[in-house]
Image (tube, rainbow, N blue to C red):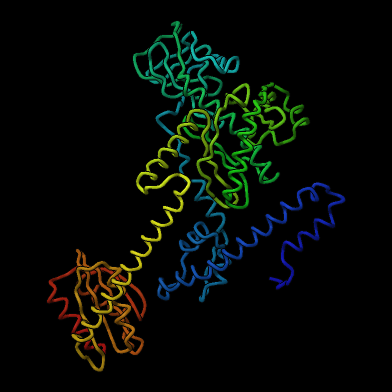
Amino acid sequence: NLKAKAKLSEIVERQIDYWQRDFPELKTEKEDILKLVEVEQGKYEETVSRGRAVVRKLESARAGEPIALSDLISLYESHGLSPEQVAEFASRKIEIPDDFYARIAAARNTQSDGTDEERSVTALPQLRATERAYYESQYCTEFDATVAYCDSRLIVLDRTYFYPEGGGQDPDTGYIEGRRISDVQLVGNVIAHFYEGRMLHAGQKVHCTIDRDRRMNLMRHHTATHVLIAGARKILGNHVWQAGAHKQSDISRLDITHFAQLSPEEVAQIEETVNTVILENRRITVEVMDRIRAESLYGFRLYQGGVVPGRDIRVVTVEGWDVEACAGTHCERTGEIGAFKILQTSRIQDGVIRIEFVAGMPALHAIQGIFSTVEELKKKLSSDEHHLAEAVDRLSAKVREMERKLQSGEDRSAMKLSSELIEKAYSVNGARVIIHRSDAEQEQMKKVMKTLTAENDVLALILLKGSPARIMIGRGSGLSVSCSGLLLEIAEKFGGNGGGSDEFAQGVVNAAGERELLDFIRKRLTSKQ
């Protein structure tokens, strides 16, 4: 930390001005770069500020015990705090393993990748590559073929129009000779159709049908993904890159690199941009090209959906809008996408925003659902759509007022009970000791405890109903007895656990008969004073 007064963005701006002659793209992207730096610096400062409080809270909960390795891992993964930062914030020395980051990486590598073993294919006989007829016509949903292989789980055809799962796109479903096809997977260069029903035999001629509505929904969603990524880049900046995607029949998602959550205005702009391109009915072309030639023409943005293997690649072009290497199924014109609607956006990790959207009939259904909800609210709130927000505001204000009154009533109830308990307190060596058993909610009793311990000479013990019973112990600032120590003695005698500080402790205790428990507490409290 050099304690420099200049903001990081100012330093970066000077560097851009200095280097822009050699790197002209820096000047073009200057505004986006500076905005990104400002956002990242703000996030870092927020992390540091929040991190100090998190570490202090953790140390308090550990009651003097050092922060363990498991805590360091949790703080790193949940709060973004490096072990070096934790050591800086902690009041006691922390041991940081030299291989800390290697351990993190190893733990992540051993996590399950979620592979569906039921659908895995460990071995198939030597078969000829399946002819991928779906590239000949992506609109074909009925065809004849010959069975190349069949076992109790899967069918392999000599040629197929069924699209296998891949590139983030769900597979087609349908029927082969009346057998329901529930999944399609690419195994090497063979396409496996998972089926339900009686086995077929090799060489058998079969009639196949693909679920047309599902195929069209997948094509629309996949095409919309291409239009969306370019639209997001146009609105948000050239730093936007595809970080992941999943195209399903009823809903799809696109993950993009971006440094901040999207504002409602940005979402609206992206949505309008995509729908404009759809209305323009732009042509979509597919060309199989030599990889080197494609890269020289279009650059590495070709691979924003991931690197496609092979010497030759399929290049999908949305006329005047987007170019990508892609092996999926697409519409021939953007107008076929139909309606497009963003349902929600969320920040799934630092620097990655998820956009969930629908296109075609699913978009219409989503819009109809929204209007149905609006109609229902209009009836319940006795309002029209133009004044619905005002009606909701009025209702929210009423709810807040009721909650305020309820809170006020609970506070008065806590004050009243506290006064009654103080009157019934018994004196032990100058302290007013209160033992109370309650059927009330824990939060309400915490308020009572807070009121009681505002008195310097009060030691309060509250038992809540349950098996085991919850227990809270608190004391005023004028007493020296340790609440956590007292709780440990109770737990040791009757069974239970808990913890806390000298001023307040809570936990659970196994009731061994209420009278026995209270007699023990009285004796112990007497000895503590």
In the rendered view, tell whether residue 116 sits above or below residue 290: below
Q: Residue at x 23, y 85 (%)?
A: 422
In the image as oriented, which residue stretches furthest toward the bottom? 430
In the foreground, 455 or 156: 455
Instruction: Tell me if 485 is positioned left or right of 352 in this view.
Output: left
In the image as oriented, which residue stretches furthest toward the right? 21
Q: Residue at x 45, y 69 (%)?
A: 58
In the rendered view, tell whether residue 205 sits above or below residue 319: above
Q: Position of residue 456 (x, y in %)?
A: 33, 88
Instruction: Tell me if 33 is positioned left or right of 378 in this view.
Output: right
Quadrant (top left, top right, bottom left, bottom right) of the C terminus: bottom left
Q: Quadrant of residue 1?
A: bottom right
In the foreground, 461 or 38: 38
Q: Position of residue 248 (x, y in %)?
A: 49, 31
Q: Position of residue 187 (x, y in %)?
A: 51, 24
In the rendered view, tell whether residue 277 sits above or below residue 136: below
Q: Quadrant of residue 415?
A: bottom left
Q: Quadrant of residue 404?
A: bottom left
Instruction: Tell me if 355 is positioned left or right of 227 in this view.
Output: left
Q: Residue at x 45, y 53 (%)?
A: 390
Q: Position of residue 399 (x, y in %)?
A: 36, 60
Q: Residue at x 12, y 71 (%)?
A: 513
